[in-house]
Image (cartoon, helix red, strand yellow):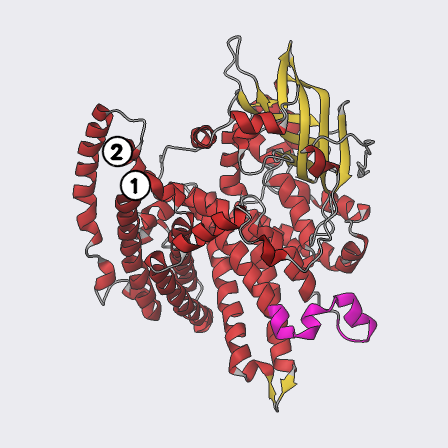
């Protein structure tokens, strides 16, 4: 029986929700982490320099596939048709399948292409630059769909069963529900054990690929009892199983070609053999999958940023105002410089994190999350600046431009398509909290019981002793470092000064975090805007490091160094501003104002307008629709 939204809301407290999320975290750090060390004030450049590089065989295989994919994209895909019809044509899907694009991340032993993470992301950059809906189709299938969790957590029998199918069939990942987003403790969908099967009931929302998928990864609650641990559990489900109905194909601001819908499960029988991992491991599987899977989003963002740079360069040189190309006017020149430098850094972050994932020498959970956060935020700013540079043509559709005889440049479409990346696979706000949790992990490990209101006196005393030893050793290391030596990082030439800045800022970041822990203790988790700035500083420092390391590897007659230098100068301004805003801000007054807004104190401000909202059954019934069910599943033959 499906638990209703209202009762579930009453049953799950904030603490219980946090405990569920905490239990799903990967708590062990078995390998070093550049990102973790950065937040602790330790600039471990040795973990990323020399820049990791793939083996020759994987590079050769990847380049060969990119050549075939580029030719297909140039000759067989009409992006305007996808935008106009709000659908990826069947022949394009078939062509991608024949090319092997659905098996890019699947090993050759299972019939896949066997690309490295680096070349998988290069492929997503390429296809996403043609139309981001294609990037979403391929990444939702391979980064979070059936292939990745099966590769990481499936048995050998499951790999032999599902992976070959995933090279030619489409899969989707189903976690979100109408009343459940980033709070999985309140998951409604249930999986009731029944003999050798589980019986699924529930509704899933925003199921990218779900409208056309052949296979689904479904997260559902298994009840505890009778020797079962229960909890959120992952299952592979056949999309055409009896009892599965796609009730709606959703439409969005951008990504008009994605097949994203609402899927209802009614007494759907799933063999126990289709369970991935153990009962209760579903959320852990989902989060672990995303540690690497998140790199697909910054790949698409980097591809769009590179395209925006091309259009900005061409237009800023071509368009003349007041006797000069607009790009020579400082107001526009600043935008062009921002786009060029940031596009370079975004790709540098992506490439470094991807190479680290392939090398598998370090733990990249923080680096991948930072790349996703930074790529989505900066990619959006780049798209917005491109629209501004293009002026009225930036706001006009490509189809309209072409109809009146001009080159149709889809700048407004890129802006719409890019917007979702700040929400997909962890919104910016959730990413801030996720990364912040990892950033303060070392502090909680030694001092958690001190700030835990449920800890008894003995636990607090032990924690105090433990914390004293840790901080006695750690705090002195934050006083001085290589960043204060003018000759440090000399092999980087003119970029050395930026790396010295990163080292100094890393120690300052760690000191700021410690001070916040001391000041607010358990209340720090409520200071989400403070934590967000801490994470944003770390993201800028990681981006600077990646840009410098990449430029040192790929000088290109000094051009790469010029871009890295420009980016670092821009990033340093942002870092200094963020440090200032850690303590000089309006957070307290804003929080108080928001409480009054929610208490309806200022509803008079809303007078004088009309509300065009459309109320439907989903709003009225919290996800339970009483209307006629409509199966809009569109199988790809």
Q: Which residue: 57% across, 56% down?
A: 301
Instruction: Indicate the position of residue 586 as horizontal and vertical percent values.
Output: 40, 58
Asked if labels 2 and 1 touch by Cβ distance under 8 angstroms, the answer is: yes
Q: Sort mark 1 into few (<14), some (14-19) or many (20+) by Cα contacts within 10 Å.
A: some
Q: Quadrant of residue 622?
A: top right
Q: CA distance from mark 1 to mark 2?
A: 8 Å
Q: Which mark is residue 41?
A: none
Q: Which residue is mark 1?
A: 521
Instruction: Indicate the position of residue 453 as horizontal and vertical percent values.
Output: 31, 30
- Which SS does the magenta portion mostly show? helix
Q: Which residue: 56% across, 29% down?
A: 9
Asked if residue 335 is among those painted magenta in the image, a careful observer would answer no
Q: Tell me: 478 left or right of 416.
A: left
Q: Tell me: 393 left or right of 441.
A: right
Q: Quadrant of residue 158?
A: top right
Magenta stretch in the rendered image? 386-407
Q: For the C terminus, which image quadrant? A: top right
Relative to 503, does residue 386 appear above or below in the rendering?
A: below
Task: Say how many tags the image has.
Answer: 2
Can the viewer see residue 186 in this picture? yes
Relative to 17, does residue 80 appear above or below in the rendering?
A: below
Instruction: Indicate the position of residue 444 as horizontal and vertical percent values.
Output: 31, 36
Q: For the N terminus, which image quadrant? A: top right
Whichever of labels 1 and 2 marks the residue nearer the N terminus, that label is 2
Q: Sort mark 2 into few (<14), some (14-19) or many (20+) by Cα contacts within 10 Å.
A: many
Can the viewer see residue 170 in this picture? no
User: The residue tagged with tag 1: helix, strand or loop?
Assistant: helix
Q: Which mark is residue 450?
A: 2
Asked if residue 403 is among those painted magenta in the image, a careful observer would answer yes
């Amino acid at each position: 029986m499906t638990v209703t939204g209202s009762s579930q809301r009453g049953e799950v407290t904030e603490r219980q929700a946090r405990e569920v999320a905490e239990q799903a975290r990967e708590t062990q750090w078995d390998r070093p982490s550049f990102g973790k060390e950065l937040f602790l004030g330790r600039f471990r450049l040795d973990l990323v320099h020399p820049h990791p590089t793939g083996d020759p065989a994987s590079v050769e295989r990847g380049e060969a596939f990119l050549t075939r994919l580029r030719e297909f994209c140039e000759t067989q895909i009409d992006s305007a048709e996808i935008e106009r019809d709000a659908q990826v044509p069947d022949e394009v899907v078939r062509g991608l399948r024949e090319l092997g694009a659905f098996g890019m991340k699947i090993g050759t032993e299972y019939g896949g292409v066997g690309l490295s993470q680096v070349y998988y992301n290069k492929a997503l950059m390429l296809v996403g630059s043609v139309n981001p809906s294609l990037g979403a189709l391929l990444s939702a299938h391979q980064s979070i769909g059936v292939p990745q969790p099966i590769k990481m957590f499936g048995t050998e029998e499951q790999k032999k069963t599902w992976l070959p199918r995933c090279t030619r069939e489409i899969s989707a990942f189903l976690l979100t529900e109408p009343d459940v987003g980033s709070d999985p403790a309140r998951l409604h969908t249930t999986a009731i054990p029944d003999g050798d099967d589980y019986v699924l009931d529930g509704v899933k929302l925003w199921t990218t690929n779900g409208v056309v998928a052949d296979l689904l990864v479904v997260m559902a609650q298994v009840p505890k009892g009778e020797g079962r641990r229960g909890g959120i559990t992952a299952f592979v489900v056949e999309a055409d199983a009896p009892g599965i109905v796609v009730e709606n194909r959703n439409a969005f601001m951008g990504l008009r070609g994605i097949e994203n819908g609402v899927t209802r499960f009614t007494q759907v029988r799933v063999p126990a053999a289709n369970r991935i991992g153990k009962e209760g491991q579903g959320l852990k599987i989902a989060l672990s999958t995303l540690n690497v899977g998140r790199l697909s989003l910054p790949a698409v963002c980097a591809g769009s940023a590179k395209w925006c740079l091309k259009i900005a360069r061409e237009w800023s040189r071509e368009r003349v105002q007041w006797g000069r190309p607009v790009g020579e006017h400082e107001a526009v020149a600043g935008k062009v410089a921002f786009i060029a430098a940031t596009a370079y850094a975004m790709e540098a972050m992506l490439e470094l994190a991807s190479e680290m994932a392939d090398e598998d020498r370090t733990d990249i959970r923080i680096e991948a999350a930072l790349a996703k956060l930074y790529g989505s935020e900066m990619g959006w700013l780049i798209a917005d600046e491109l629209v501004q540079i293009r002026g009225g043509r930036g706001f006009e559709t490509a189809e309209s431009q072409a109809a009146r005889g001009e080159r149709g440049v889809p700048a407004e479409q890129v802006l719409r398509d890019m917007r979702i990346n700040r929400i997909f696979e962890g919104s910016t706000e959730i990413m801030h909290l996720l990364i912040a949790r990892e950033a303060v992990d070392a502090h909680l490990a030694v001092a958690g019981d001190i700030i835990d209101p449920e800890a008894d006196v003995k636990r607090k005393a032990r924690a105090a002793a433990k914390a004293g030893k840790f901080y006695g050793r750690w705090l002195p290391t934050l006083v001085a470092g290589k960043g204060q030596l003018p000759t440090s990082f000399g092999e980087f030439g003119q970029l050395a000064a930026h790396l010295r800045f990163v080292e100094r800022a890393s120690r300052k970041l760690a000191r700021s975090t410690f001070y916040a822990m001391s000041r607010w203790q358990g209340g720090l988790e409520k200071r989400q805007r403070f934590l967000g700035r801490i994470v944003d500083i770390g993201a800028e420092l990681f981006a600077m490091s990646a840009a410098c390391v990449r430029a040192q590897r790929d000088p290109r007659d000094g051009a790469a160094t010029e871009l890295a230098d420009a980016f670092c100068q821009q990033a340093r301004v942002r870092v200094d501003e963020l440090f200032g805003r850690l303590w000089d801000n309006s957070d307290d007054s804003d929080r108080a104002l928001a409480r009054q807004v929610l208490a309806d104190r200022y509803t008079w401000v809303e007078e004088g307008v009309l509300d065009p909202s459309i109320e439907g059954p989903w709003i009225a019934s919290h996800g339970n629709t009483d209307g006629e069910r409509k199966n809009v599943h569109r199988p790809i033959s």
